[in-house]
Image (spheres, helix red, strand yellow):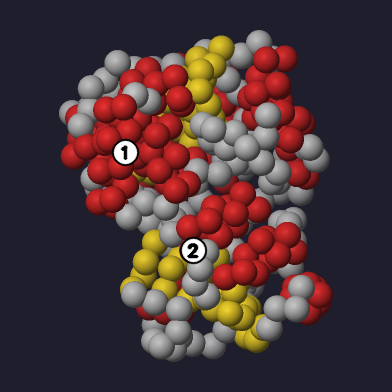
Amino acid sequence: MLKDFLQNKPLYYDEIDYNRMPKVYERIKSNFKRVKIIHIIGTNGKGTTGRFLATALYKIGFSVGHYTSPHILNFNERIWIDGFDVSDDMLNLSHEKLLNILTKQEADTLSYFEYTTLLAMLIYEDVDYVVLEAGLGGEHDATAVFDNILTLVTPIAKDHEAFLGNSIKEIATTKLNAVQNMAIFAQQADVEVYNVAELLKIKYKKVSFFIDKEDKKKIIEISKELSLAPYLQDNLSLAISALKYLKIDYNSTNLLKSKLFGRLSKVNNNIIIDVGHNTLAAKAILETLNGAKYILIYNSYKDKAYKEILRILKPIIEHVEIIDIAEERIEEKNKLEDTLKELNIVYNSFKDIDKNNKYLVFGSFSVVEKFLKAYDE
């Protein structure tokens, strides 16, 4: 069973073997059918951009796969095909097929993400398009080994510095080295991203090249119907730019059921959840929710800039409730508390929800997962 197999693989590594996935794929690539792949790289917005594009392509009449990560509640969320998360039966059948393709050593040494990327591409062998979302980065990402027809570049900012670099220039270089052919860039907050693209001699166009007056009308219509925050409207624009580049006609109805859960999603009238976990995501939330106050249900990984994130969100924070997460990567509670004291933000431990208060659950997929499981109980 796939579930048991994956439980023996760590989700994260202190060091990454950048040669393992390319070597394994080179040996086994004849087992994979060639499909049209649209690769999505960047720091924020990959998931929603991918879901907007995949849904539109599916509603227009194509068979489509969307590979995204991580998941919130069920692994199946990562492998979406023709409007639905993959079934357990299909996962297990493809898992058995993949084990027969790989050597035992390869199956054992491939990382969680590397193995599941290969698994997804086996499942997607008969689709027309695959919208393939990178995990951490760009050139060394497991998704980068597959030939693609187009790369979409969402906003690039500082995140995962231990693996990607300490400056925008380093991070952008690592990510943009994954571009194989043509790229479409979302609006970038840092001009350095464009400078890197020029240095690397990447063929690219900005979203503004594709979006005309008629598209803007459709974006307003879709955004109103789906109650999209400004940053989600930007992701929608990037997805539509891909359709325009591919010369695929679309209408508003093709995108009306495409919002990805966990991105400024309302659980009910007084609870909003968001899986963002970096400063760019915090700025987008502040822009959307500014003017109101929320109890922030929060925790953070050690490698995240949580002090800056909390500083950004402070104008909308009533107080913070720290939700306990049993993971090695989570910051020690006393260090998080010291940061909250330094920022003069009142805090306590999360216990339950009061229907008379407004809540924002934010701080990674792990935080949202833990909250949803507790809330469901």
Specify whether residue 56 is in view.
yes
Specify whether residue 36 is in view.
no
For the point 68% across and 29% down, the residue is: 191
Q: Which residue is mark 2?
A: 289
Q: Element under label 2?
A: helix
Q: Where 334 sits versus 161, above or below?
A: below
Mark 2 is surrounded, within 10 Å at the Cα level, by few (under 14), some (14 to 19) or many (20 or more) other residues, namely: some
Q: Where 306 sits versus 259, above or below?
A: below
Q: Where 200 sits versus 362, above or below?
A: above
For the point 70% across and 44% down, the residue is: 158
Front one among 332 and 278: 278
Front one among 359 and 84: 359
Say which amino acid is labelled 1: Ile
Q: Element under label 1?
A: helix
For the point 37% across and 25% down, the residue is: 211
Q: Position of residue 321 (x, y in %)?
A: 60, 80
Q: How many numbered marks have been drawn onto this rendered protein structure?
A: 2
Q: Position of residue 187 (x, y in %)?
A: 54, 33
Mark 1 is surrounded, within 10 Å at the Cα level, by few (under 14), some (14 to 19) or many (20 or more) other residues, namely: many
**Quarter of the image holding residue 20?**
top right
Q: CA distance from mark 2 to mark 1?
A: 20 Å
**Quarter of the image holding residue 299?**
bottom right
Viewport quadrant of the C terminus:
bottom left
Q: Which residue is mark 1?
A: 219
For the point 70% across and 21% down, the residue is: 195
Front one among 118 and 336: 336
Along the polypeptide, which appears first: circle 2 or circle 1?
1
Q: Position of residue 97 (x, y in %)?
A: 39, 35
